[in-house]
Amino acid sequence: MNKLILVFALSLPLAAAEPAGFAYWSGTELKAYGKKLAPKMSPQKVATEQLGKWGNHSTMMAYREGDGEAEVHEKVADIFVVQAGEGILVVGGTVIGGKSTGPCEIRGKSIQGGVKKKIGPGDVCHIPANTPHQTLLAPGSKSISYVVVKIE
């Protein structure tokens, strides 16, 4: 009888808790964020939701139905992971009409002299701190959604 109990006990999966700070979002869940965020659209045609924050980095979901402002995060790098839709990422150059919108944050109307990269599902972009960038909708695209990892 003891042998039978031992065999049964060894066949059970070991219960393990997820490590502190671990987070998981499935691709299906991330792609569905567009529908979830669309009703929360700002007058600037963008909606965001923070997914998590840990020490020097955080994650958020961004959904756009219009062009974004030019922005510079003086001390924060961004990593974009495009989930759905298509856009044009403008990086580098000079922010036109840049104004401080908070500590170490600058926003402006557009970028002059930047490099344009077409972005779509599955694309990953690393934008170093203190680098002007702007997300625009690609011609013919109605929206774009992407995960943003912010690293201080």
Image: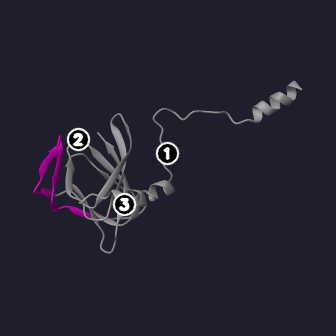
Secondary structure of residue under mark 1: loop
User: Which percent across, then down, holds residue 23?
Assistant: 47, 41
Quarter where residue 8 is shown? top right
Boundaries of the magenta span: 94-118
Q: What residue lies at 20% left-to-right and 44% top-to-bottom?
A: 74
Q: What residue lies at 36% left-to-right and 67% top-to-bottom?
A: 86
Q: Earlier in the sequence, mark 1 or mark 3?
A: 1
Which residue has dot 2 on it?
75
Which residue has dot 3 on it?
38
Which residue has dot 1 on it?
24
| Circle nearer the viewer, 1 or 2 | 1
Q: What residue lies at 54% left-to-right and 35% top-to-bottom?
A: 18
Q: Residues within 10 Å of mark 3 (few under 14, many from 20)?
A: some
Quarter of the rendering occupied by the N terminus: top right
Q: Residues within 10 Å of mark 1 (few under 14, many from 20)?
A: few
Residue 116 in view, yes or no: yes
User: Which percent across, then down, holds residue 130?
Assistant: 20, 47
Amino acid type, residue under disc 2 in the picture: Lys
Q: Label 1 to label 3, Cα distance in Å?
A: 22 Å
In the rendered image, residue 105 lying in the magenta stretch gets the answer: yes
Q: Label 1 to label 2, Cα distance in Å?
A: 26 Å
Q: Residues within 10 Å of mark 2 (few under 14, many from 20)?
A: some
In the rendered image, residue 9 lying in the magenta stretch gets the answer: no
| Circle nearer the viewer, 3 or 2 | 3
| Circle nearer the viewer, 1 or 3 | 3
10 on left or right of 15: right
